[in-house]
Amino acid sequence: MRVLFVCLGNICRSPTAEGVVRHLAREAGVGRQWHLDSAGTGNYHLGEAPDERSQRAARRRGIDLSALRARQVCAEDFHRFDLILGMDHANLRALQGLRPASAGAMLGLFLDYAPQLKQREVPDPYFDGEQGFETVLDLCFEAGRGLLNHAAG
């Protein structure tokens, strides 16, 4: 399974989702079956590591995001990935606008894999305090488990 997680700048939500799903896939013994990446719809933070607050929150849960670097979604992504998941509706709309007509990737929202939350968007924690980053992690764990269960069929 090839999955790309997408937010606006690729320094908070999408790298957290990538790290969490990678962690969960390894724990489930299926890590080698998953190719995971993250990107942003904007080019604001190209080449930067995830926000330090995201990294701190993830480290507290045993997840290391330090090697990840921000990049922007490109047309090739729509051919390389099976599934491209936006963190919110604005990301999804941007992806729909960028998607080439010949692309095979399915688009969706990450939180659609956690319907029990009754929430469809992962809120952007960038302008919030530390708790916002913890909330993002909680949501990513729920949706990540749902994604893995869905893929297991």
Image: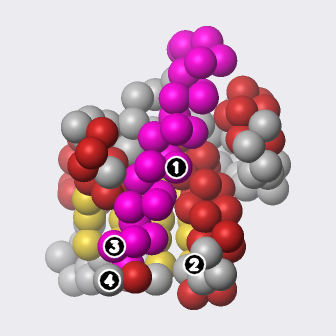
Position of 49 with respect to 116 (left or right) is: right
Position of 137 with respect to 113 (left or right) is: right
Q: Residues within 10 Å of mark 3 (few under 14, many from 20)?
A: few
Position of 117 with respect to 37 (left or right) is: left
Question: Above or below — where is 128 with respect to 53?
Answer: above
Can you identify the residue that label 4 sits on?
A: 153
Mark 2 belongs to which amino acid?
His
Can you identify the residue that label 3 sits on?
A: 150
Residue 2 percent location from the top left of the image:
47, 79
Q: Mainly helix, strand or loop, the magenta region?
A: helix
Question: Are discs 4 and 3 less than 8 Å apart at CB?
Answer: yes
- Residue at 52% in and 29% down: 135
Residue 112 percent location from the top left of the image:
26, 53
Q: Find the magenta span and give its range.
A: 127-151
Which numbered disc, 2 or 3, marks the residue closer to the eye? Answer: 3
**Secondary structure of the residue carrying numbered label 4:** loop
Mark 4 belongs to which amino acid?
Gly
Can you identify the residue that label 1 sits on?
A: 141
Is 130 in the magenta? yes
How far apart in space, not on screen, are marks 2 and 1 (Cα)? 18 Å
